[in-house]
Amino acid sequence: MPDKIPQLIRQACNALLRLSLPAKCALLLTLVLVLHSSLLLLASARGNAQVMNEQYQLFANQWVRQVAFQAQPGLLRNDRVALLNMLNQHRDNPLLAYASISDSEGSVLVEIGRDGSDWRHYSAPVLLGNDIAGSVTLALDPTPTRSQQLNLNAQLLILAAILAALAAALILMLGRHIDALLQRARSHLLWPSEQPGKLPYAGRDSLGDLLATLSDPPLRVPPMESREVEWIVVQVYWSSYSRLTQQWGRAELERRLTRSHSAALALCNLYHGALKVYRRDGLTLRFEALEGGDSALLRALCCAHLIQQLDAKLGARPTLGVVRSRGTRLQLEATEAALADSLSAVDGKGIRHQLPLDLKEQLPGWASEDGSGIKIEARYQNLLDSQQRKLEAQLNGD
């Protein structure tokens, strides 16, 4: 059985998670009220017990002194019949279990009831002037007092249970009403073409503001900030895309495209670029100036070289261009997409370019250009070959 306790706890937690929001709120409030009522009942029971015990002690002491006073004439005459009759007058009290009157030497003269160790004993001397003529002992049964205390605690517990049930029912009804309002507001968001009706919630609070916003969402035009950029763009055109689509089949083509996208993303992370896809027969890589890093043009050249080697079977033909423009983000991306179409149409072998004169003059620092396109200087080849081998090993799952 102890081994099943964690499983039972998990099942209970899963059952609680499956409850609706109103049910969770009602259950939580019920638990809080039950805990509060239990603590209140415990504190009340202790307080009541202390008060009743004090009253019980006061009553018992007064009672035993009263009996001692009543026993004075009988002890004075040593009349046991009178003493017994006097004790019998108190027999009808349900608290009295035993009573006795003793003389000055402690010998019991008369007694009624049955003495027991569980009773509470109270004694008082019988005084005749300044002399002690004897003593009276009363043994009281605490059972009736305990019964009264238990009845009082039971009443408090019943009242607490009724209060918890009423509060849980109220919260459940309120939660279901709020849940229905939220569902209606959610439907307005899912079907914005429908004319939203006014939600029946008149409260001026955060819930009312939320429902009003959901049922009638505000239309805010976002600001379109304009900025000036210089992007070095590498447009990779797969010249064999159409032919290989028929030759390889759909499954093999998708595998090749996934491989090319993965390689391009890895190179963009390595050389701090961004990957865009504007055409289905190629990729677009964007490079911006990087403070304290390599030139954007050099990083674009390295990526163009590696992609040309990795996508050789797709007939990758990288072409370099530049976006120098000012506009919003969407306008700049539209300019970049137009440039991608233009670069994809450039004929020639190897890495080609459509760069302005100032960027073209920077090429000799890193590459040479001939009839077969742009070629990276030999001093970069070892690094590029190492990066190519690592990428091929990862792409091939080695």
Image (cartoon, rainbow, N blue to C red):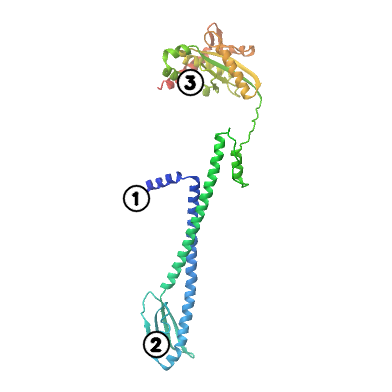
**Residue type beneath disc 2:** Leu
Q: Earlier in the sequence, mark 3 or mark 1?
A: 1
How far apart marks 1 and 2 lie (CA) works out to 63 Å
* Residue at image mark 1: 2
Q: Quadrant of residue 140?
A: bottom left
Are there few (<14), some (14-19), or many (20+) residues within 10 Å of tag 3?
Answer: many
Residue 357 versus residue 43: which sits nearer the camera? Answer: 43
Are there few (<14), some (14-19), or many (20+) residues within 10 Å of tag 1?
Answer: few
209 left or right of 44 in image: right
Which type of secondary structure does the marked residue at label 3 adopt? helix
Q: Earlier in the sequence, mark 2 or mark 3?
A: 2
Q: Residue furthest top?
A: 371
Residue at 55% x, 6% y is 370
How far apart marks 3 and 1 lie (CA) works out to 54 Å
Which type of secondary structure does the marked residue at label 1 adopt? helix
**Count of residue discs:** 3
**Residue type beneath disc 3:** Ala
What numbered label is drawn on residue 263? 3
Residue at 57% x, 20% y is 286
